[in-house]
Amino acid sequence: MKICLATLHANPCFTPLSLLYLKASIVDSLSYPADDVTIVEEARDADPDAFAARILSARPAIVGFSCYVWNVRALMAAARRIKAAAPDTIIVLGGPEVGPIAVDVLRANPAVDVIVSSEGEVPFADLVARWREGRAIDDVPGICRRRGACLRSTRHRRPSQARARGRRRYAAPRRSPPRPRRPRPSATTA
């Protein structure tokens, strides 16, 4: 089961830290093959059709979008295109722009299947584990999900519950291959 984590950046120099943490959580906590989790990132003015095509080229079963104020409209457009081209693809949203209003976002966007309404590392890994095992996601804490015409939210996991499950720390993100560094402007002397 391939996973594609994607976002559009406000600044192309940004590193997709939230997506790197999600990938690290999936790879480390689930022993998931790193090559089966791709990260796709573009500038915020990227064409939604081209962005969706790039995501679909990875042939993912699950697409996770990291949503912020500067990219949420373009990501919704990409989600619609992905769902139209590959209806069985599971589309998951997370981030500060969608989590607090998850029910409203699901209601307005039928292409979206699940929204993680809090920090995503633990709930997203739980979702992936259950989908991989063919199990229901009804009681995964901290999500809002669609089941047919019904929308359901679950309560967030309390920090003590996460510790009891052995997840005291988040996995450290790794980026392979390293991202090329942009040269810093040098001071010129007269």
Image (cartoon, helix red, strand yellow):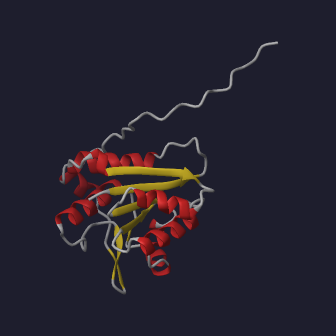
Residue 86 figure quarter: bottom left
The number of numbered discs placed on residues in the rendered structure image is: 0
Q: Residue 169 placed where, x, y %? A: 29, 44
Q: Residue 23 placed where, x, y %? A: 34, 49
Question: For this rendering, which residue is in front, 158 or 189?
Answer: 189
Whether residue 96 is visible here, answered yes or no, is no
Q: Residue at x 48, y 73 (%)?
A: 80
Question: For this rendering, which residue is in front, 54 or 41?
Answer: 54
Query: Is residue 151 shown above or below 144?
Result: below
Question: For this rendering, which residue is in front, 5 or 36?
Answer: 36
For the C terminus, the quadrant is top right
Query: Is residue 12 shown above or below 188?
Result: below
- Name the residue at the top extreme: 190
- Name the residue at the right extreme: 190
Residue 60 figure quarter: bottom left
Q: Residue 110 placed where, x, y %? A: 44, 79
For the N terminus, the quadrant is bottom left
Residue 147 figure quarter: bottom left
Query: Is residue 146 shown above or below 157?
Result: below
Q: Residue at x 17, y 64 (%)?
A: 133
- Name the residue at the bottom extreme: 149
Q: In the displayed structure, does residue 130 sit left or right of residue 11?
A: left
Whether residue 173 is visible here, answered yes or no, is yes
Q: In the displayed structure, does residue 85 sit left or right of residue 62?
A: right
Q: Residue 46 placed where, x, y %? A: 60, 56
Q: Residue at x 25, y 47 (%)?
A: 33
